[in-house]
Image: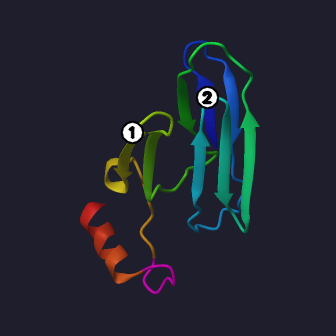
Amino acid sequence: MLGVVESSSGNHLGNCASFAPRDNKWRRFFWTLTEEALICNVTDTSSAISKVHFPPSVFPRTFSLRILAQRGPSCFRDMIVQNEKMAGCPPELKRNSFQQTSLNCGCPTRKQGDSDSSAAEQSFKRKFY
């Protein structure tokens, strides 16, 4: 689950959540956060999109995000944060990447012969875990 809180007041504004079965398969989880809304796109068995509208505010907002899980998550493959402001000229486009090597991952090593596993993945896991 991804929770969004307004930093200045501590008010909870919205959540994105996945209710996928715990089958050790990768899920893509995208969200878009603007001053007005949180848009979530989770690929469970089919893609589900939801939108949470925030109450209006006359003041500029800053947000705090928290990623939570009931029992995990087992691992993040990577997380990309794009800080884009399309208004103005030129538009502001910034990107921050977080690779699994810098996240507290705790991924279990896959078994040999696992259909989702590749030699490159196994080599990578042995190198970093």
x and y, in percent, of residue 94 in the image: 37, 42
Quadrant in which the C terminus appears:
bottom left
Task: From the image, give the main secondary structure of the stretch colored magenta.
Answer: loop
Q: Earlier in the sequence, mark 2 or mark 1?
A: 2
Closer to the camera in the image, 12 or 34 = 34
x and y, in percent, of residue 48 in the image: 74, 58
Closer to the camera in the image, 3 or 41 = 41
Which residue, as the protein is rendered here, is positioned at the far left? 127
Which kind of residue does numbered mark 1 sit on? Pro
Residue 118 within the segment the image draws in magenta: no
Q: Which stretch did the figure color magenta?
A: 111-117
Q: Is residue 5 left or right of residue 96?
A: right
Compared with residue 98, is residue 57 higher up or lower down, i.e. above or below?
A: above
Residue at x 36% of width, y 44% of height:
96
Closer to the camera in the image, 59 or 20 = 59
Which kind of residue does numbered mark 2 sit on? Glu
Which element carries disc 1, helix, strand or loop? loop
Among the 4 quarters of the image, the one containing residue 92 = top left
Closer to the camera in the image, 90 or 120 = 90
x and y, in percent, of residue 23 in the image: 64, 68
Residue 90 is marked as 1
Residue at x 69% of width, y 37% of height:
15
Q: Which residue is mark 2?
A: 35
